[in-house]
Amino acid sequence: MIGTQEKRQGVDWGRGLLAGVGAGLVAALASVVVRALLHAVLPPLVPTLGSAFVAGLGGGVLYVLLSRVWASPTAPFVIVILALATLDSIFIAALPMPGGPLPRPLFPVVGLIVPIRQLAALLGLGEFGTRTFPREYLLAVTVIHYVTAAAVAWLVPWWAGQQSRPG
């Protein structure tokens, strides 16, 4: 119709967050299965569950935000999710672990916090420690990163959907 504009509202916050919660739960379960199949004791179970769940929730928020910028947010969303999984894996494999104590309340999401602290150390806002992640568990942590990323990248857009409404 002439003279009307369509205002893209994007994905509703409730749908996006619910999709993120669901994807986080699936990612957490899948991460535990990968950890068991690879007989890995690292990464620890609780941070693996917590980080995968929070990654799903964060993915839901990111998808909602991207849906307000792009008409089709799925491709940029998948690119960002896979890029983050790749950066996390590279940081864990190539850099020393961050120095200093981790605040106790952050323990359940240490899998998300460690790469952020490593990045901060690279930028001079933190410090590196003397330890590195044990090499024998790098495969497990990398597979867990990508299983989580794949679950979030696939399930959040599918469950959240995309809606455009007249403004």
Image (tube, rainbow, N blue to C red):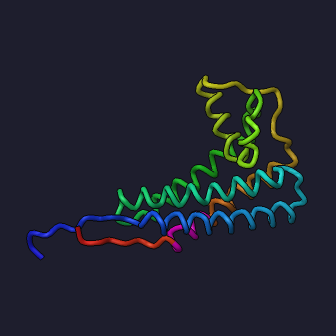
The furthest residue to the bottom: 1
Question: To which quarter of the image does residue 92 belong?
Answer: top right
**Quadrant location of the C terminus in the rendered image:** bottom left
In the image, residue 81 lies at what x, y percent?
A: 56, 55
In the image, residue 63 lies at what x, y percent?
A: 47, 60
In the rendered structure, the answer to whether residue 112 lies left or right of residue 1 reads: right
In the image, residue 158 lies at what x, y percent?
A: 52, 73
In the image, residue 62 lies at what x, y percent?
A: 49, 55
Report the front residue among 38 and 54: 54
In the rendered structure, the answer to whether residue 18 lies left or right of residue 70 reads: right
In the rendered structure, the answer to whether residue 149 lies left or right of residue 30 reads: left
Question: To which quarter of the image does residue 143 belong?
Answer: bottom right
**Which residue is found at the position 73% from the left and 31% from the top?**
98
69, above or below 162, in the image: above
Assess whether residue 155 is covered by the magenta stretch: yes
**Which residue is found at the position 37% from the left and 72% from the top?**
163
154, above or below 100, in the image: below
Report the front residue among 10 and 138: 10
Report the front residue among 85 and 67: 67
Chief secondary structure of the magenta portion: helix
- The boundaries of the magenta stretch are 152-159
